[in-house]
Image (cartoon, helix red, strand yellow):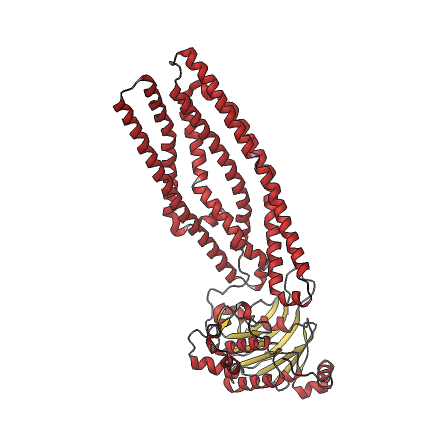
């Protein structure tokens, strides 16, 4: 896992190394300053000439300025290195997510991925900053200060033999008690983000059922749960301060009491005032380095959980990938399913699809009907290889889909879903997802065929109208027509409409299908629908039931031979299913 994160330093290796060198220089000078200060104090006491005192004072000023420069440089370079490191980690995680198949994404909830990209990356950045600054500074300061204290104080340094073990034991005990609470927080962050995401996505439903107060209470409970864990952990960590104060005061009293006795009894020959002042400073440096080390321990333990969560994403191998000798050209839009069965997971008890045999010639129009859970959407998701068949072979253009480069295959297949998304930006920018180089004339033509041009031009800004995130500022029918236009601009070999005209009226639906016949006659069109009217003029129709093809044929043939199709048709025609808005 450490190697994985080391790779994320990349172009920030130089600032990272310079930060370490600056920290070493800063610590080295800081432990020398008390030594030089002791010499100055002893010189004043001994009546040293003013010129010599000024020289010693100037040396201390220069040392302080150099230490300040080292510290400032370390802070500046450390910030640059840690921010760049976090940027690389976040970018690597995002790119890895983009390479995931649906099977990989199913292993992580959306809320969890958001937490890993935000909160967890933040903790890892802090850990990196501490590693190259405090985690280097604290042990160096501890070692250097002890050496200097022993050299200057002799027996007086024995105070640290008592103080250091007590402080270390106390800090480790505090950190150990606080860690379980910190670890528990991350999973609760996932649940909190999931609650927020669910609420925002379902805001219309929440308001429609007047459940705002319930959602507020649910969010408040989740927030309170996190606050409770943090409070418990922080309450334990807060014991650091009184423990530190106890050790500092003990150290101060011991040094002053024993040191004063040594000065008096030894007449300044064993130890002098300057050495005592230096010992007090070294004592503070030693204890503060231990205090900082305990905070590093707490932060690193918290960050270790974040590192593991991020590493899980970075180490997750995409279940779908392009072969080494991949095909980059799809010859035509023919589709073949040969003895195909499919499960969404290896542990699933039942197949989502079973024994599918299907042969669709290029350029034909195929309709698919069936009840909820019959496998309609699952069937078409195997065509662009969003999933791989569990058994059997799916072919496009006469070749196994697993032989193609994934990008080439998916560029040859356009899918328009019932709940297709629009992204933040203008209508023009959204349409060009289908073809980044499309001209304004091509955009307008695709929109006319998708019956979207008229309502677009009714907006004050036309094609430059701003679309809010998710397309919330346009109606469901308008959103579907924009998505269809976007798919048409791709000029695919295969066009899949997964109930993507459910929010438009039957008249508009018919005009859209007529546009398909004139604009993309050579494209294979697969239309999943709930309305018989949407598929009855197809070359042939599949009726799905229980993950299998229950029947197939033309509209007239199925009316005669398929009870399921006939029942759907009669319910819709005799029930007077009207146009949908």
Left or right placement of residue 202 versus residue 154 in this view: right
Give residue 513's position: percent from left, percent from top.
Answer: 57, 84
Q: Quadrant of residue 530?
A: bottom right
| 153 or 528: nearer the viewer | 153
- Whether residue 160 is visible: no
Toward the left, the furthest residue is: 51
| 338 or 272: nearer the viewer | 272
Q: Look at the image and tell me in which quarter the C terminus lies.
A: bottom right
Residue at position x 48%, y 50% from top? 4
Residue at position x 45%, y 44% from top? 129
Rendered view: 436 above or below 61: below
Toward the bottom, the furthest residue is: 556
Rendered view: 72 above or below 84: above
Residue at position x 47%, y 68% from top? 326
Give residue 457's position: percent from left, percent from top.
Answer: 49, 81
- Whether residue 91 is visible: yes
Rendered view: 523 above or below 48: below
User: Number of numbered discs present?
Assistant: 0
Residue at position x 43%, y 82% from top? 441
Left or right placement of residue 533 versus residue 490 in this view: right
Give residue 359's position: percent from left, percent from top.
Answer: 59, 79
Left or right placement of residue 236 versus residue 31 in this view: right
Give residue 477's position: percent from left, percent from top.
Answer: 59, 77
């Amino acid at each position: 896992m450490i190697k994985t994160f080391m790779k994320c330093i990349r172009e920030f290796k130089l600032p990272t190394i310079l930060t370490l060198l600056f920290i070493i220089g800063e610590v080295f000078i800081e432990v020398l300053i008390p030594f030089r200060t002791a010499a100055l104090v002893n010189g004043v006491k001994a009546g040293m000439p003013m010129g010599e005192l000024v020289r010693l004072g100037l040396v201390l000023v220069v040392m302080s300025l150099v230490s300040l420069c080292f510290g400032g440089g370390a802070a500046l370079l450390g910030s640059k290195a840690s921010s760049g490191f976090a940027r690389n980690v976040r970018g690597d995680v995002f790119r890895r997510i983009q390479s995931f198949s649906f099977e990989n994404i199913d292993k992580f909830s959306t809320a969890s991925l958001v937490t890993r990209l935000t909160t967890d990356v933040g903790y890892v950045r802090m850990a990196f900053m501490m590693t190259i600054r405090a985690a280097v500074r604290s042990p160096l300061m501890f070692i250097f200060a002890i050496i200097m204290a022993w050299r200057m104080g002799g027996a007086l340094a024995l105070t640290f033999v008592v103080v250091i073990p007590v402080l270390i034991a106390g800090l480790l005990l505090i950190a150990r008690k606080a860690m379980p609470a910190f670890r528990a927080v991350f999973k609760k962050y996932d649940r909190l983000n999931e609650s927020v995401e669910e609420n925002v996505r379902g805001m219309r439903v929440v308001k429609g059922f007047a459940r705002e107060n319930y959602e507020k209470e649910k969010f408040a409970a989740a927030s309170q749960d996190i606050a409770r864990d943090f409070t418990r952990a922080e309450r334990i960590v807060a014991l650091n301060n009184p423990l530190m104060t106890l050790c500092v005061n003990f150290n101060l009293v011991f040094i002053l009491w024993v040191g004063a006795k040594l000065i008096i009894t030894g007449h300044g020959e064993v130890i002098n005032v300057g050495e005592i002042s230096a010992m007090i400073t070294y004592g503070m440096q030693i204890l503060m380095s231990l205090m900082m080390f305990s905070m590093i321990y707490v932060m690193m333990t918290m960050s270790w959980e974040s590192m593991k969560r991020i590493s899980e994403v970075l180490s997750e191998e995409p279940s779908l990938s392009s072969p080494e000798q991949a095909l980059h050209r799809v010859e035509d839009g023919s589709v073949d399913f040969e003895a195909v069965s499919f499960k969404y997971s290896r542990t699933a008890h039942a197949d989502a699809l079973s024994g599918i045999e299907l042969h669709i010639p290029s350029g034909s129009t195929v309709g698919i009907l069936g009840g909820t859970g019959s496998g309609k959407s699952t069937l078409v998701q195997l065509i662009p290889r969003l999933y791989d068949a569990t058994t059997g072979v799916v072919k496009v253009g006469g070749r196994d889909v697993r032989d193609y480069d994934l990008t080439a295959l998916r560029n040859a297949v356009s899918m328009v879903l019932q709940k297709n998304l629009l992204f933040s930006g203008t209508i023009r920018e959204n349409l060009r997802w289908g073809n980044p180089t499309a001209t304004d004339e091509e955009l307008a033509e695709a929109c006319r065929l998708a019956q979207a041009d008229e309502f677009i031009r009714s907006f004050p800004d036309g094609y430059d109208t701003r679309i809010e995130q998710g397309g919330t500022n346009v109606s469901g029918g308008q959103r579907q027509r924009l998505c269809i236009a976007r798919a048409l601009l791709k000029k695919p070999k295969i066009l899949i409409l997964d109930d993507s005209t459910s929010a438009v009226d039957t008249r508009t639906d018919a005009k859209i299908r007529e546009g398909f016949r004139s604009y993309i006659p050579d494209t294979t069109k697969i239309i999943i629908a709930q309305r018989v009217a949407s598929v009855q003029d197809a070359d042939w129709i599949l009726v799905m039931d229980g993950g299998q093809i229950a029947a197939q044929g033309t509209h007239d043939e199925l009316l005669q031979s398929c009870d399921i199709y006939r029942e759907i048709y009669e319910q819709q025609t005799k029930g007077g299913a009207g146009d949908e808005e």
